Image (tube, helix red, strand yellow):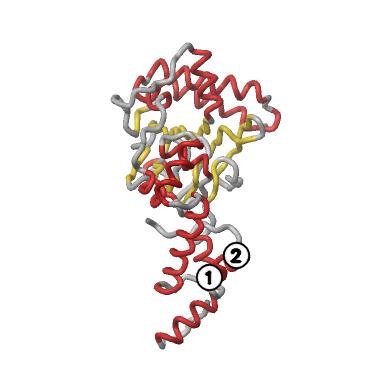
């Protein structure tokens, strides 16, 4: 599990404008289509609140999640289910002046369900034919669709939400006509072993997960997840997450040179004062004093907090 030293950004909610972004189109107050252009050597992490369809017109976008790495190159695309913590690295192609031209489509379940109903499709429930995550080629029709969107980013705030909804539907229809496997992946519920709660928790306790996220990842309803979790751990899920994060923070304070601030953020806490308070409640000392006492006991030179 890779340690990070800053808050994990929630996408699309917390994606802040950056120099490489041309803008975003919104639906129900949330960015659903982001257009980015010309960036090089950027790295980071985000946590998906909605499903993501990434389409790269030019450049290289590498993503790592669930112990796998995927590279999306020019004229390729991939779909990722929501509730995933993703590390990314994006660069341009050397032979094209390092231009990176891509769009991110954030699809919540309401939009997907609306499309399936409108198009006359039924969600795919059997799990015996699950389409794995993969990178797919982008055909000419989808390429033309991407180009048709770009003028809207010249004045994104003037684009009506109804038009944004129509353009999302258009994209999904293009996928329907061109890529059965990708459509199948979008339609199918996330495939998770119902006996995998322990694995889900270990993989995600550092992510900014909600109870709904954890239930979704485990393939359970919220009520069933709470019941199964209580039977397994004999404690509420969010209390378990907090204690697991604190145990990890204690380990990092003892074994690394990370500052208290970096330990706070790298273990999923978003507020240093809150982190210090709950750490003291669990271990008897605030983080800085805990590290100082430990190093005095072990006779390790202090190098700051």
Label 2 neighbour load within 10 Å: few <14, some 14-19, many 20+: some
Label 1 neighbour load within 10 Å: few <14, some 14-19, many 20+: many
Q: Please state which of residues 243 and 42 is positioned toward the viewer in this rendering.
A: 243
Q: Nearer the N terminus, badge 2 or badge 1? A: 1
123 lies left or right of 16: left
Residue 277 can be seen in this image: yes
Q: Which residue is mark 1?
A: 260
Q: Please state which of residues 36 and 94 is positioned toward the viewer in this rendering.
A: 36
**Which residue corresponds to the image point at 35% horizontal and 19% vertical from the top-left?**
180
Tell me the number on the disc at residue 284: none
**Which residue corresponds to the image point at 52% horizontal and 19% vertical from the top-left?**
115
Please give the count of numbered marks on the rendered protein: 2
**Which residue corresponds to the image point at 41% horizontal and 35% vertical from the top-left?**
219
Q: Name the secondary structure under disc 2.
A: helix
Q: Which residue is mark 2?
A: 272
Based on the displayed image, in which of its 4 quarters is residue 23 positioned? top right
Residue 64 can be seen in this image: no
20 lies left or right of 251: right
Residue 101: x and y, percent?
48, 37
Can you say whether 297 is above or below 259 in the image? below
Q: Please state which of residues 151 and 258 is positioned toward the viewer in this rendering.
A: 258
Q: Name the secondary structure under disc 1.
A: helix
Q: Please state which of residues 83 and 276 is positioned toward the viewer in this rendering.
A: 276
Which quadrant is the N terminus positioned in? bottom left
10 lies left or right of 256: right
């Amino acid at each position: 599990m890779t340690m990070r030293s800053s808050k994990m950004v929630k996408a699309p909610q917390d994606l802040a404008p950056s120099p490489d972004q041309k803008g975003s189109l919104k639906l129900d107050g949330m960015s659903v289509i982001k257009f980015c252009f010309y960036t090089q050597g950027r790295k980071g992490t985000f946590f998906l609140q909605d499903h993501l369809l990434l389409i790269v017109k030019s450049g290289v976008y590498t993503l790592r999640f669930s112990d796998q790495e995927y590279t999306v190159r020019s004229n390729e695309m991939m779909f990722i289910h929501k509730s995933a913590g993703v590390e990314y690295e994006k660069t341009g192609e050397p032979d094209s002046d390092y231009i990176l031209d891509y769009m991110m489509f954030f699809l919540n379940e309401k939009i997907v369900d609306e499309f399936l109903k409108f198009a006359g499709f039924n969600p795919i429930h059997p799990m015996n034919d699950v389409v794995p995550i993969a990178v797919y080629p982008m055909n000419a029709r989808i390429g033309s669709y991407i180009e048709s969107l770009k003028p809207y980013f010249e004045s994104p705030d003037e684009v009506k939400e109804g038009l944004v909804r129509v353009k999302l539907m258009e994209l999904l229809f293009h996928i329907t006509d061109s890529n059965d496997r990708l459509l199948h992946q979008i339609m199918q519920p996330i495939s998770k072993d119902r006996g995998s709660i322990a694995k889900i928790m270990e993989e995600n306790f550092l992510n900014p997960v909600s109870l709904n996220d954890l239930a979704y990842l485990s393939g359970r309803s919220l009520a069933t997840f709470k019941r199964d979790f209580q039977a397994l751990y004999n404690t509420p899920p969010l209390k378990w997450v907090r204690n697991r994060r604190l145990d990890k923070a204690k380990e990092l304070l003892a074994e690394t040179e990370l500052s208290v601030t970096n330990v706070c953020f790298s273990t999923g806490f978003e507020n240093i004062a809150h982190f210090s308070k709950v750490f003291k409640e669990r271990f008897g000392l605030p983080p800085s004093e805990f590290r100082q006492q430990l190093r005095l006991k072990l006779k390790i030179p202090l190098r700051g907090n």
